[in-house]
Image: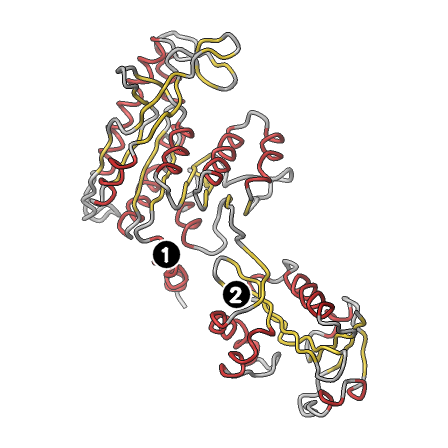
Amino acid sequence: MNDYVTWLRDSSPYINSHRERTFVVMLPGDGLENPNFANIVHDLVLLHSLGVRLVLVFGSRPQIEARLAASGLEPRFHQGLRITDPAALACAIDAVGHMRIALEARLSMDMAASPMQGARLRVASGNFVTARPIGVVDGVDYQHTGEVRRIDRKGIGRLLDERTIVLLSPLGYSPTGEIFNLACEDVATRAAIDLQADKLVLYGAERGLLDEDGNLVRELRPPQIPAHVARLGGDYQAELLDAAAQACRGGVRRSHLVSYADDGALLNELFTRDGGGTLVTQEQFEQVREATIEDVGGLIDLITPLEEQGILVRRSRDVLEREVEQFSIVERDGLIIACAALYPIPDSDWGELACLAVNPEYRHGGRGDELLARIEMRARKLGLKTLFVLTTRTAHWFQERGFNPCSVERLPPARASLYNFQRNSKVFEKKL
């Protein structure tokens, strides 16, 4: 089958779930200068066309640096924040104004034979961010460097209701008419929290958070983030992680870290089950739990291919509906990727482990062991002393986990009488 067709089919649940959702997307100044920027715009346009309510926040650090250098001025920082004196503020205003106009122009394109054809986007920017001065910290006056005081939630909401993309710059205004230079991460985080956004997407140079060995960390919870921030020190990735954690603590369901250098990183993260960046969420992205009647369809999808190969005994939908409470499952973002069932044998202290199955795409991740531990825990709670399993293909796997071969005659009479000699399954038992 064509890979595109497969991808489109697999992405349909996300297309439906993202429609009419509010996403705040932050693109730093480095991302605006990256060769991949045009593709990012195309991806944002696609999100808009799929019904996503978009708020785009942009940064301007390298552009301000360039203007300071051109003016022969030295940038000054304290604790990672720019000290914005009047000359630096003038450079910031010039850089932000230039970038805002360039972004609006890019989003206004309607070129034939391009992803922008027929888009006809409306983009709005303005005084949506009220700011206040940071003031004096450790004896250092930050002057025109500020922090977000308030986001115009109602004004932005009305524009989003009208299918307008809202553009927020790293400048804020005070009620007294002053202008303050802001960190774009602060603007994006506060916007996501105040708008009660469904997602905050943070672009950075890396694919996401990388561990000590350079491997991508797929998923994080806010309590795990301080250790990574400490490890990264003053790295920009630490700022993104801190912003993601702050957003989640503020009620944003999910924050995503993706790369502005990778073509399609945003779409891969939002429209595939495993994503391509780092997800920060309060929720459990993957969990082991007991099955409910709503899971029957997912169980059928998981075990049918294995039944057709003769690995599992066939179960009808009626049987699954009656026995669904016997199942434990691993659910990953709404998809059942593994299952196992426990059947206590009447008038005995034995239980049968049955229908242990893992989606081929998620094998070698320890999920079979997770389910086995879950089944053993359930069996002990029921007072069972012995767990047994019948298998035709996976004998070694069970033996490696403490199961020993046994005869059919060892099984309780209620189960031994049902043994299918034609199937000729091997029997293994494990004392609990």
Mark 2 sits on what residue?
A: 336
Q: Quadrant of residue 189?
A: top left
Residue drawn at (33%, 49%) of the image: 21
Rounded to the nearest angstrom, the CA distance separating label 1 from label 2 is: 17 Å
Residue drawn at (36%, 36%) of the image: 194
**Amino acid under disc 1:** Ser
Expressed as whole percent of the image width and height from the top left, the position of residue 392 reads: 69, 80
Q: Quadrant of residue 24?
A: top left
Q: Looking at the rendered structure, which numbered label has been put on residue 370?
A: none
Residue drawn at (41%, 25%) of the image: 183
**Where 168 falls versus 272 (above or below)?**
above
Q: Nearer the viewer, residue 389 or 159?
A: 159
Number of residues whose C-alpha sits closer than 10 Å to that of mark 1, classed few (under 14), some (14–19) or many (20 or more): few
Residue drawn at (58%, 32%) of the image: 229
Expressed as whole percent of the image width and height from the top left, the position of residue 431 reads: 81, 72
**Where 101 falls versus 94 (above or below)?**
below
**Amino acid under disc 2:** Ile
Q: Looking at the rendered structure, which numbered label has been put on residue 17?
A: 1
Task: Locate the N terminus and report the quarter of the image it occupies.
Answer: bottom left
- Answer with mark 1 or mark 2, whichever residue precedes in sequence: 1
